[in-house]
Amino acid sequence: QVTLVESGGGLVQDGGSLRLSCAASGRTASTYAMGWFRQAPGKEREFVTATSLSSGGTLYATSAKGRFTISGDNAKDTVYLQMNSPKPEDTAVYYCAAHNKGNWLSRGPSDYTYWGQGTQVTVSS
């Protein structure tokens, strides 16, 4: 079992920056990939980015590429999402996710086994 806890959400101005953190605990040695999803009111949960903890490989949604950066600190079992120049349309609850199914990345929420409780990000214009 892996427990994920997000932090760092809050209110940020359009064009500002914000860094989210996701700390993993439990059987983290078996975790292959971690990622971020988001869900705005009335919308489906959507993929933002993911990273392989072994290779450091990354995968980004088109909307996040060039503005958001995912990084990991294996020593701390923590993954970060650096959000630069966020826009009001980035407002959502951001969820950390992880899986231990294999060393591959996916954009599909159903491929991830473990989820955090979510942290609210609000971008004001």
Image (tube, rainbow, N blue to C red):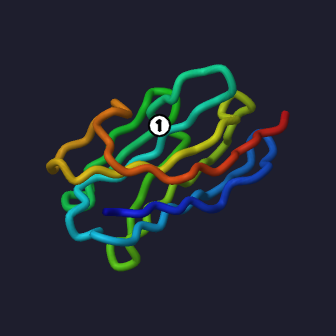
At 64% across and 51% down in the image, what residue appears?
Answer: 119
Residue nearest the observer in this picture, 68 or 106: 106
Image position, residue 103 (x, y; %): 16, 50
Residue 26 sits in which quadrant?
Answer: bottom left
Q: Residue furthest front?
A: 1
Image position, residue 92 (x, y; %): 66, 36
40 left or right of 78?
right
Q: Is residue 119 above or below residue 122?
A: below
Residue 111 sits in which quadrant?
Answer: top left
5 left or right of 86?
left
At 33% across and 33% down in the image, what residue appears?
Answer: 110
At 28% across and 69% down in the image, what residue appears?
Answer: 27
Q: Is residue 74 above or below residue 101?
A: below
Q: Is residue 80 above or below residue 115?
A: below
Q: Residue furthest right?
A: 125
Q: Which residue is mark 1?
A: 48
Q: Residues within 10 Å of mark 1 (few under 14, many from 20)?
A: many
Image position, residue 91 (x, y; %): 70, 35
- The amino acid at mark 1 is Val
Q: Is residue 65 above or below residue 94?
A: above
Q: Quadrant of the C terminus?
A: top right
